[in-house]
Amino acid sequence: MRQVSWPVISIAISLYLVAVSFRAASVEPQLETLVAASDPWPPYVDEMHPEMGVSVEIANAAFATQGFKVRQLMVPWARALEGTRTGTFDLILDAWWSSERAMEFMYSRPYLDGSVKLIKRRDEPFIYQGLDSLSGKQVAVVRGYAYNDEFNASPDIRRYEVVDFASAVAMLLRGRVDFAIENELVARYRLGQVAPDSLAKIEFVEPPVSVNLVYVISGYRNPRHYEIITAFNRGLEIIRNNGEYLEILKRNGLQDLEKGVR
């Protein structure tokens, strides 16, 4: 019998493993990258989250069924909005609806609850009885946020624009405004990270100012807006039906955010 040397066997095994790896790689689907932009809005978009936020996690699960993946960029909200409107970015994953915004962006199906409430100083008495009860009040708002059409358009509310929610709460606690406004879950999450002592000094006002839902949007000036939003809608339906969507919410302790979005 002819003897085969160990070096020859070693080379043959290496070549075999390379061939197997190559075949496996060629079978693995290659996902096309979509670029999303937003400012931090934990837990929806959160650079401290292992998946960059719950919205990013859901979007990646949905888009993966359609051959896409998401790369999330953190930029100021106004820049994210303008860049997505013009097509510099492909999409925003955590947008609220407004009639003005709907003229510039195609909206997906809603996929999470994002209702917002007024926030007041704990020692200040106030009963919210609709927007009329805010007449003459000073409210700190984040520039570019679509709280709702009625709130944004009301001539009787004195709105002070700030760059982020933490600035709004700082103004509130210094007595420079009467209210801040934000989704309660987001507000508690963010203040718990950056200013936990402030949570004992504020109070969330019932009922909500607006029952907002969370959407994926893509600008109409992006030539692929229809393809992107349709892909998300299809993928969302798939992960709802196979249970992955609910598993993501449970894993993040956010089962309640599914309410009202079917």
Image (cartoon, rainbow, N blue to C red):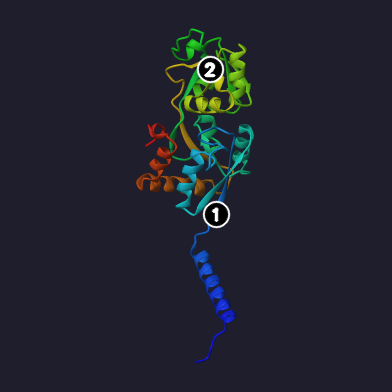
Task: Indicate left or right for 61 with 224 as reference.
Answer: left
Toward which corner of the image does residue 153 lie, by quadrant? top right
Q: Residue at x 36, y 48 (%)?
A: 242
Task: Indicate left or right for 207 with 160 as reference.
Answer: left
Q: Nearer the viewer, residue 227 or 216?
A: 216
Q: Nearer the viewer, residue 259 or 22?
A: 22
Toward which corner of the image does residue 136 lie, by quadrant? top right
Q: Nearer the viewer, residue 61 or 105?
A: 61
Is residue 26 positioned above or below 52 on the image? Answer: below
Q: Nearer the viewer, residue 218 or 8?
A: 8
Image position, residue 246 (x, y; %): 38, 41
Asked if marks 2 and 1 touch (Cβ < 8 Å), the reply is no
Amino acid type of the residue tagged 2 in the rendering: Ser
Q: Which mark is residue 195?
A: none
Is residue 36 positioned above or below 165 on the image? Answer: below
Q: Residue at x 59, y 34 (%)?
A: 39
Image position, residue 138 (x, y; %): 58, 13
Is residue 138 positioned above or below 143 on the image? Answer: above
Decide: few, some or many residues near mark 2? Use Cα within 10 Å; few <14, some 14-19, many ≥20. some
Amino acid type of the residue tagged 1 in the rendering: Glu
Q: Which mark is residue 32?
A: 1
Q: Which residue is mark 2?
A: 154
Q: How many marks?
A: 2
Farthest bottom residue? 1
Q: Secondary structure at mark 1?
A: strand
Decide: few, some or many residues near mark 1? Use Cα within 10 Å; few <14, some 14-19, many ≥20. few
Q: Earlier in the sequence, mark 2 or mark 1?
A: 1
Q: CA distance from mark 2 to mark 1?
A: 43 Å
Q: Secondary structure at mark 2?
A: loop
Q: Residue at x 48, y 49 (%)?
A: 63
Image position, residue 70 (x, y; %): 54, 47
Image position, residue 218 (x, y; %): 54, 42
